[in-house]
Image (tube, rainbow, N blue to C red):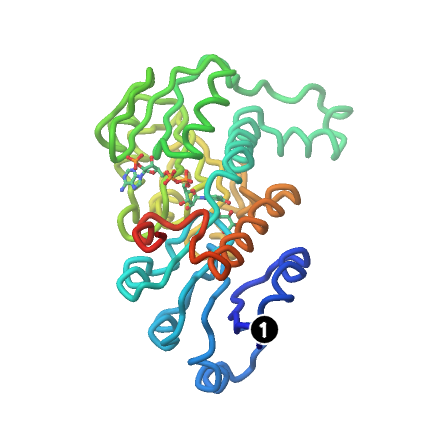
Amino acid sequence: MPKRKLLQIGNITSRMSDRLSGNFDIIEYFKIQNKEKMISRNAKEIVCVLTDGHWGVPDNLMERLPNLEIVSSYGVGYDEIDADFAASKKILVTHTPDVLNDEVADTAIMLWLAVYRQLIPADRWARQGNWEKEGSFPLSRSVQNQKVGILGLGRIGETIARRVKAFEAEIHYHSRSQKNNNYHFHDSPKKLAENVDVLFVITPGGNATRNLVDESVLEALGKSGTLINVSRGSVVDERALVDALQKGTLGAAGLDVFEKEPFIPIELKNMTNVVLTPHIGSATAQTREAMGDLTCDNLLSYFKSGKVFTPVPECSKLNI
Ligand code: NAP
Ligand code: 8YV
């Protein structure tokens, strides 16, 4: 039997391509010069798309592939994939929830510690010989006994909450729904920000959460407040964030995600009260292997049994 045609958008690991190449004829979207020609030649035969949270599925591509059955995405966030449209066309979209919770929560905690304890300036002080020339590094801020806010108490938000308990934190949150736990619920991001010292942002991206953290939320967090964003750049109004940090109406920030990745505003790059990482929330060899395995398992299982392990909620009714 000829192999099924799989359109691969974005990079995959060699382990993933080893697992898939026996079953699929892989077309690498970004390696094709003339994409139009490739699509018109292969449109009817492409039955699956493999992508990631960054690239998603380009506009109109799903409409142009009449026999597309499944989109398997390497990542949990799928704001770059129109899952409602896919569901309406009976295209099953899958993602990789849970296997990355610990890694992303660790990244969030790493950013928080780095901001509060001044890791980057302290490292510079040590390397540049200031310790010998000028003496001790200035005192920093303790992460113990803080009021910690979590915007988006989902899988990763809960994992962050479990970690901050170890720092004797008082935990506050805002989500669409109130949970049955001992944490303090607030019915808006602004009220949450008013009540905490540090705000972790970990909602999905997309239109529903665009600029959920706006000027008023940043102002409510205040001049001694810290924002940690490991969700999507779109969730925070980046212009308002730069302004608040420049004016000092917000104290500090730790950022893993940005509005127009891979571009980071120069103002943020020049601030010493900001720690920046290039969207590495899940980026360890171990976690990427688990994500890659789940991405492949979803595809292989679909063509074996018609069912997948982790459909996105919009497509769960198709997984029967
Ligand atoms: P999840 O389990 O679906 O949790 C999302 C949380 O956000 C839920 O608590 C949800 O509320 C809340 N939420 C959704 N829309 C909201 C809105 N409009 N207003 C307020 N709260 C809202 O998702 P997850 O697995 O934790 O992942 C969260 C996101 O993290 C992903 O979608 C992705 O964008 C991002 N992420 C980033 C990285 C990275 O590398 N930096 C890695 C992985 C994931 P309810 O609980 O009430 O439903
Ligand atoms: C990945 C992510 O970097 O899972 C997500 O939502 O943001 C990250 O784990 C992204 O999917 C690109 O591969």
- At label 1, counting other C-alpha atoms closer than 10 Å, the crowd grade (few under 14, some 14-19, many 20 or more) is some
Looking at the picture, tell me which residue is in the foreground, 1 or 35.
1
Q: Is residue 119 left or right of residue 63?
A: right
Total number of numbered labels?
1
Q: Residue furthest left?
A: 187
Indicate which quadrant contains ligand 1.
top left
- Residue at image coords 56%, 74%: 27
Dividing the picture into quarters, in which one does residue 201 lie?
top left
Estimate the x, y position of residue 53 in percent, counting from the top left. 46, 54
**Quadrant showing the N terminus:** bottom right
Indicate yes or no: mark 1 CB to ligand 2 under 8 Å. Answer: no
Q: Is residue 62 above or below residue 81?
A: below
Residue at point 61% right, 62% down?
A: 20
Q: Looking at the picture, how far across and down is residue 92, in whole percent?
A: 38, 59
What residue is rendered at 47% in x and 17% in y?
Answer: 165
Q: Amino acid at mark 1?
A: Asp
What residue appears at the point 41 percent right and 47 percent down from the top-left corner? 232
The residue nearer to you, when weighing 282 against 73, is 73
Mark 1 highlights which residue? 25
Numbered disc 1: secondary structure: strand
* Rendering coords of residue 182 (x, y %): 33, 15
Figure quadrant of residue 88: bottom left
Residue 210, x across and y down, in percent: 30, 49
**Looking at this view, is 78 or 200 the one in front?**
78
